[in-house]
Image (cartoon, grey):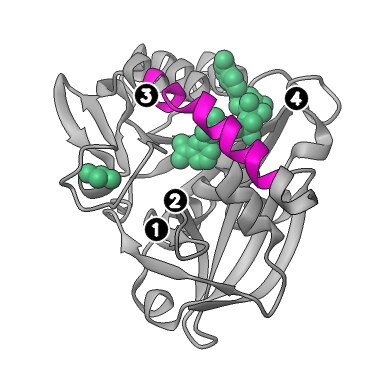
Amino acid sequence: MNAVIKKEMLSENVVRMVLEAPAIAKKRKAGQFILLKVDEKGEKIPLTIVDSDAQQGTITIIFQVVGKTTTMLADKKKGEFIHDLQGPLGNPTEIEHFGHVVCIGGGVGVGVVYPIAVALKAAGNRVTSIIGARTKELLILEEEMKKVSDHLVVATDDGSYGFHGFVSAVLQDMLDRKEKIDRVYAVGPVPMMRVLCDVTRAHGIKTIVSLNSLMLDASGMCGACRVSVGGKTKFTCVDGPEFDGHEVDFAILANRLRMYSQQERQSLEMYRCACHG
Ligand code: NAD
Ligand code: FES
């Protein structure tokens, strides 16, 4: 059992939660995730570790409330308990001094790219970050990203704040201006990662994406999180979660992510009915 130490809303349906998890806090590295079970019977969901405090014995997660499990998690109050946490899982981000790196986060994906930007900056890279949201109220972690970046560009789809357009247009603009970029990290919705990879492929810039596949047990055995990378089947839980974006089959990933959407909707409706009588 792990206590909820702190909970806050970052936007309408995005929650930042600090959890008691001393063993994980001591070991975790950028790019790794936990598998979390809210109650005894519930499903396990993977969530990136956004931050940790080894002295306090805590980790921070950020999640979007989309289905039954994330709704149950968001309903937890400070002082209440999460049934089970496993981790840290997955391979840490490969961190080196690459030169000029661009870290791109879309929507709630900014929470996933943040620890990567922190580690890249600590390794001496020049970090440009691009963060995007549909509208200003949905933008998260602007201050945090500004602190770890040499330069931060904000973009909104509706133009309510910062650049008017997608994060991919900001990157395209940098490349059109012949900015030298050594590596790109992109985390967000599948269409965003696919478009960004198309942009960087044309310039031969290595691009790392973090994939949020469905997972069951993170054992590398059940196959639930399988993705196709370079024509080969990979398991996101043990081979990832980060992959060379130019090798990822995004169409297969998008199909697999949609596979249980009807069941997820039904499950959420049943949970809401049970809560409200
Ligand atoms: P969103 O749909 O609001 O998009 C966020 C930003 O991504 C946009 O502002 C835009 O800049 C960019 N974007 C979106 N579509 C694009 C396109 N077609 N071309 C170029 N850029 C585009 O994001 P949201 O609702 O916060 O995101 C939720 C999605 O992110 C879910 O699908 C979720 O599964 C995914 N997600 C992924 C990860 C991961 O590890 N990859 C982690 C968390 C969430
Ligand atoms: Fe079972 Fe990855 S979640 S193999």
Counting residues from the start of the chain, the first of labels 2 and 3 encountered is 2
- What is the span of residues highlighted in magenta in the rendered image? 255-272
Farthest residue in the right direction? Answer: 160
Packing grade of label 2 (10 A; few <14, some 14-19, many >=20) is many
At label 1, counting other C-alpha atoms closer than 10 Å, the crowd grade (few under 14, some 14-19, many 20 or more) is many
The single residue placed furthest to the bottom in the displayed view is: 55
Q: Where on the picture, by quarter, is residue 247?
A: top left
Distance from disc 2 to disc 1, alpha carbons, whole Å, reads 5 Å
Q: Pointers 2 and 1 in contact (CB under 8 A)?
A: yes
Q: Amino acid at mark 3?
A: Arg
Q: Is residue 141 visible?
A: no
Question: Sequence-wise, which precedes: disc 2 or disc 4?
Answer: 2
- Separation of marks 1 and 4 at Cα, in angstroms: 35 Å
| Of pointers 3 and 4, the one earlier in the residue sequence | 4
* Amino acid tagged 1: Leu
Q: Amino acid at mark 4?
A: Phe
Give residue 122's position: percent from left, percent from top: 44, 63
Q: Which residue is mark 3?
A: 256
Query: Which is more N-terminal, label 1 or label 3?
Result: 1
C-alpha gap between disc 3 and disc 1: 19 Å
Q: Residue 77 at x, y = what percent? A: 72, 70
Q: Is residue 155 above or below residue 81?
A: above
Instruction: Give whichever of 12, 165 is nearer the camera.
Output: 12
**Image spot of residue 82 (x, y percent):** 54, 70
Q: Principal SS element in the magenta part?
A: helix
The amino acid on which the numbered mark 2 sits, given as a three-letter code, is Ile
Between discs 1 and 4, the one toward the N terminus: 1
- The residue singled out by tag 2 in the image is 45
Residue highlighted by disc 1:
35
Question: Is ligand 2 less than 8 Å from the beta carbon at label 1?
Answer: no
Please state which of the two labelled residues, at mark 2 or mark 4, is closer to the viewer.
2
